Amino acid sequence: MNKQIRWVSVFAAFMFFALLLNVTYSSVFRQAGLNQDSRNLRVRDAEFSQNRGDILVGNTAVAHTVATDGQYKYLRTYPQGAQFAPITGYYSYYFGRTALEQSQNAQLTGTSDSQVLQRITGTLSGKKPQGGSVVTTINAKAQQAAWKGLQGKKGGVVALDYTTGAVLAMATYPSYNPNQLASHNLKATQQSWKSLLADSSRPMSNRASKEIYPPGSTFKLVTAAAALQTGQYSADTQVSTPSSITLPQTTNKLGNEIDCGNGTVSLTEALENSCNTAFAKIGMSLGQEKLRDQAKQFGFDSTVDSDVPNVASRFPGDMNQAQVALSSIGQYDVAASPLQMAMVSAGIANNGKLMTPYLTQSVRASNLQTVWRHHNSKLSQPMSRSNAQQLQKMMVSVVENGTGKPAQIDGVTVGGKTGTAQTTKDASPYAWFVGYSENPHVAVAVFIESSDTERSEIAGGSLAGPIAKNVIEAVR
């Protein structure tokens, strides 16, 4: 009998130990996953009564939590609202989370693996869990310059440190106020949501990184890169620049926006003056596979595994020669986000090495101890070092001698490419500027969807170039 009792006691002790082990494992290691489950309403209610961590630009909180006396003990606030909305996103009871509020939710709630020790210490001391603070890569002055430049326009701006991939600015206009969706007045948040969705200006659209548009002549950077990578072209190679060409198997003619002559010029001069016919002919000679491969190496047709909100840009497949010609100059079915075009410029500026863009520099626990730091990572190698340096010089020539003159900065080497992308006959064209500076190390893309400018005066250099210039100057 005693032997049987002992076996029962051992079994009961084993089961108790297994239960304790499972509870401990779930509390420490499964907590993040369980907290992220959208079906967990108890967690959602608890989070709204939790002191969520700050999202910081420098030492300034652009997302902050304040104590309240209502049903939920803490309220999420956004002191600079619309300006930082594409970065912070919103945190709403009914409408969930977006941007950093979503991608860094575990860090902000203190449930990430990097904050295990803080959770255990808090549990043992009887304190309620507190979230960690996310320190962003955003440069406050660059963000302000981008935001100011977009006022009165529709568009987006992205600036990167091309040596690391750090996002220095990401602005979109028009924007929205995340406070309207974070309110504890839940009926008011529902009404705000309906109003934002009904707004024809689409203020919740992140035009900087979550929307794609025809990149126009800025895509000629990709075509030029593909040409250089074949080894058959250099910056000095003479290319044909007829005043117009008839697209293969059509009666449609493609001409140049400005006079490119009617003979031959160097590849550099063709980029300076954005000669459509030259790049269309180059694209057709390269073939769609080389163009597509080059575009993919810069990031087209895939999303970036990063905390930066993004969607895949697009290079079309299965084209005829006429479509290849148009795609070579960023038309037909080519579509890119400003983030994507900033990545193209970044890869060129960084001697052919494209770094993965990112927004979170580090995470601080509630005791201000840094518990996580970003480690830079290479995304791809779109170009050889020598070819990238050739293309850099070609881009500098665009700013010094060609269509990119409005982006010139005294004492700073700036390279760039302008673009004016046609949409429909009734709509104004899109204006682009894509470029980089040597010191500071900034790659930038500016996209203007629409403005009050007369249609005849819309050009990437004049509309987007000055905004890029101001963003670069803000980083100096």
Image: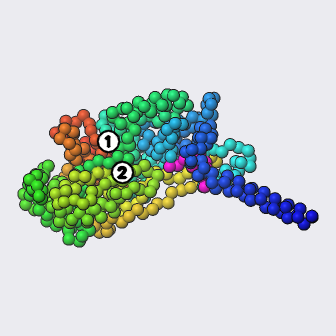
Q: Earlier in the sequence, mark 2 or mark 1?
A: 1
Q: Position of residue 404 (x, y in %)?
A: 23, 50
Q: Position of residue 403 (x, y in %)?
A: 20, 50
Kindly give the residue lying farthest to the left in the view shown: 262
Residue denoted by label 1: 155
Amino acid type of disc 1?
Answer: Gly
In this view, the residue in front, 398 or 412, is 398
Residue denoted by label 2: 339
Q: Position of residue 83 (x, y in %)?
A: 42, 38
Instruction: Check if residue 105 falls in the magenta segment.
Output: yes
Q: Quadrant of residue 438?
A: bottom left
Q: Is residue 419 above or below residue 148?
A: below
Q: Position of residue 98 (x, y in %)?
A: 47, 44
The secondary structure that most of the magenta stretch takes on is helix
Question: Measuring 19% from the left and 56% from the top, which residue is drawn there?
Answer: 323
Question: Measuring 62% from the left and 41% from the top, which residue is drawn there?
Answer: 42
Is residue 442 in sight in this rendering? no
Amino acid type of disc 2?
Answer: Leu
Q: Quadrant of residue 75?
A: top right
* 4 left or right, relative to 185: right
Is residue 330 in sight in this rendering? yes
Q: Is residue 269 above or below residue 446?
A: below
Q: SS for tag 2?
A: helix
**Region rendered in magenta:** 103-113
* Mark-to-mark CA distance, 2 and 1: 12 Å
Q: Quadrant of residue 226?
A: bottom left
* 34 left or right, relative to 392: right
Q: Is residue 196 above or below residue 38?
A: above
